[in-house]
Image (spheres, grey):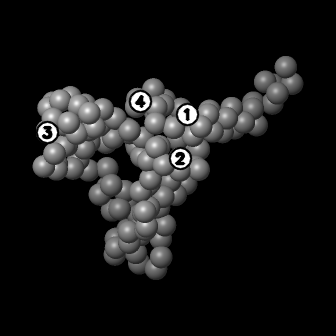
């Protein structure tokens, strides 16, 4: 997937990315979001309106972890949408998000856990000494 830019502020872009989206076949709603630098992490809940979408029946839900890379250029801000199943090679996703969506990429989730373990070890020198 490519980058999508438009004339807007970073805050306007983020607000747009977390708004609910009502499609013909499903409803998408961000149920958690977090910004780490220029990465917007979110958990998106999908409610199916048409049987068979994502292997679900009408009214059933599932969730996935989304990673939007954010970048500014002049007076424009853009994003590159990725999701867990694409193994985005960014690992600053909040750990609690892993419990909020079914696993799509075991290797990526291991990378997230490793990232947080290394980060916690650097921030807690007592733990490193033990």
The residue that disc 1 covers is: 106
Q: Which mark is residue 102?
A: 4
* Spot occupied by residue 12 in the image (x, y as percentages of width and height): 33, 62
Regarding residue 41, the answer to whether it shows in the image is: no
Figure quadrant of the C terminus? top right
Q: Which residue is farthest top? A: 130
For disc 1, the neighbor class at 10 Å (few under 14, some 14 to 19, many from 20) is few
Badge 1 vs badge 2, beta-carbon distance below 8 Å? no
Res. 85 in view:
yes
- Of callouts 1 and 2, which one flags the residue occurring earlier in the amino acid sequence? 2
Q: Quadrant of residue 80?
A: bottom left
Percent from the top left, x then y, of residue 76? Answer: 40, 75
Secondary structure found at label 2:
loop
Q: Which mark is residue 87?
A: 2
Tell me the distance, in whole angstroms, between the alpha carbons under discs 1 and 2.
9 Å
Q: Earlier in the sequence, mark 3 or mark 2?
A: 3
The residue sitting at 53% across, 47% down in the picture is: 87
Could you tell me which secondary element the residue under label 3 belongs to?
Answer: loop
The answer for how far apart the CA atoms under marks 2 and 4 are is: 14 Å
Residue at mark 3 = 50
Residues packed near mark 4 inside 10 Å, few (<14), some (14 to 19) or many (20 plus): few
What separation in Å lies between label 4 and label 3 (alpha carbons)?
A: 20 Å
First-in-chain label (2 vs 4): 2
Q: Sequence order check: which comes first, mark 4 or mark 3?
A: 3
Residue at 34% x, 73% y: name it.
6
Neighbours of disc 3 within 10 Å: few (<14), some (14-19), many (20+): some
């Amino acid at each position: 997937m490519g980058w999508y830019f438009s004339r807007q502020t970073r805050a306007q872009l983020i607000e747009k990315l977390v708004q609910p989206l009502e499609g013909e076949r499903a409803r998408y709603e961000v149920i958690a979001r977090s910004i780490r630098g220029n990465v917007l992490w979110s958990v998106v809940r999908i409610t199916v309106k048409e049987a068979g979408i994502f292997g679900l029946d009408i009214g059933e839900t599932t969730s996935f972890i989304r990673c939007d890379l954010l970048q500014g250029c002049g007076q424009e801000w853009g994003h590159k949408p990725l999701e867990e199943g694409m193994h985005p090679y960014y690992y600053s996703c909040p750990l609690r998000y892993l419990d909020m969506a079914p696993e799509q990429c075991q290797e990526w989730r291991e990378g997230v856990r490793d990232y947080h373990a290394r980060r916690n070890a650097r921030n807690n020198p007592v733990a490193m000494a033990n």
